[in-house]
Structure formats: C-alpha cells, structure tokens
Image (cartoon, rainbow, N blue to C red):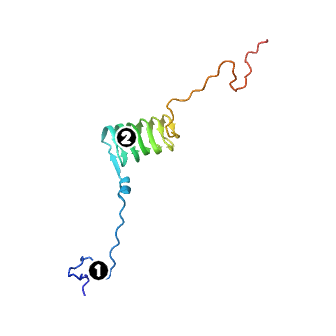
Amino acid sequence: MSLFDKRKDGESADEGTILGAPPPAPRPRMPEAVSAAREIATIGKTITITGDLTGEENLVIDGKVDGTVVLRSNDLTVGQSGRVTANVRASVVRIEGEVTGDITGSEKVVITKTGRVLGNVVAPRVTLEDGAKFKGRIDMDPGPAQHAATPKTLKSVPTGQSTGVPDQPSEDTGTA
C-alpha cells in the first residue's frame, strides 16, 4: 500500500496528502477592512512634503510637512524627528516631535515628553506628558457645532442698578 492516496477516477492526490491524515485546517483570513486599518505609512526623516496630505491609513511623520494633514478616521504620529507646520485632523494624534498649527483629534491628542506644540488643540481627551512643551488653547468640549470662536462678554450693568455684589467700604476715611 502506498502512502499516497489514489482517487477513484485514477488521478493521484497531491503528493503531500498522507492516507488517514486529516486535511490541514484552513488558515483564517483577516477581513480586508481590518488589515487595511492597521497599515501604517511613513514619511521618512529625509522627506519634505509641501501641500495637503489626506489618507485612509495610519501615518507616521518623521520628516517635514508644510500644509494640512487630514486622516479623519485614522491615527497620526509625529515622530521625534518630525517637523509639521500644518493644521492636523485625525482620530488619534500623538506628537513626539514639533507641530506648529491647530490639532484636532476626534478621539484624543497626546503630546509626549519630547513633543512641542504651538497651536490650539481640540479633542475630547488630551494628554500632556511631563516635559511636553505646549503653547495654545485646549478645548476638550467642542460640542456639536464647536462653540463660537469669539468669547462671550459680560453684560454691563447700567448705572444705578445693583450688580449683586455687596458694596465695599470706601477707602476714603474723611469725615462727612
């Protein structure tokens, strides 16, 4: 008896098939959407890009980018050697290098201890690690319409009406 199976139609099976051995289990396939979401593109240290960057995959910037960066449903990491002069929008933004421009993270923004940011940050969660350099404004409650850009001013009180603050004694100590 041969180790290789003969089919009834006279053709032999694959030479790797051993009689009595169970067929190999099929390897599970990752759905393409899951594997595509895990792909990471990299802009290397010696690369300079001027213009608008958009994409549907995660991105690491180790080079220089001037313009805009939009990865709405993906993650952006600005590496330690990365220098970005752009407004940035991504799901998760992690800054290890330098960013000059406004940053919007739909999930969160992290500025690491080596990160330097000059610009405003809008995200529901913001982390500034000890040692991070940051100059700008942080908005962690942008709301559905991202509040108006101008701050609300206090209404002035017409003369003769109470402000609700008790009167303070006068510093004038002269006699009446």
- Place residue 79 in its image quadrant: top left
Residue position marked by numbered label 2 in the rendering:
69
Residue 160 percent across, percent down from the top left: 69, 18
Q: What residue is disc 1 on?
A: 18
Relative side of 107 to 3, left or right: right
| x, y percent for residue 88 | 40, 39
Tag 2: Cα neighbours inside 10 Å, few (<14), some, or many (≥20)? many
Q: Residue furthest left?
A: 10
User: Residue at position x 26%, y 76% from top?
Assistant: 16
Residue 12 in view in this figure: yes
Q: Residue 95's quadrant in the figure? A: top left
Residue under the image location 23 percent in, 83 percent down: 8
Q: Residue at x 76, y 15 (%)?
A: 173
> Disc 1 residue type?
Ile
Quadrant for the N terminus, please. bottom left
When the figure is inspected, residue 133 is found, relative to residue 11, above or below; the finding is above
Q: Residue furthest bottom?
A: 1
Going by the numbered disc 2, the residue's amino acid type is Val
Q: Is residue 127 left or right of residue 11?
A: right
Q: Earlier in the sequence, mark 2 or mark 1?
A: 1
Instruction: Residue 57: give x, y in percent of width and height.
Output: 36, 49
- Nearest the viewer among 157 and 170 is 157
Question: Mark 1 packing: few (<14 Cα in 10 Å), some, or many (20+)?
Answer: some
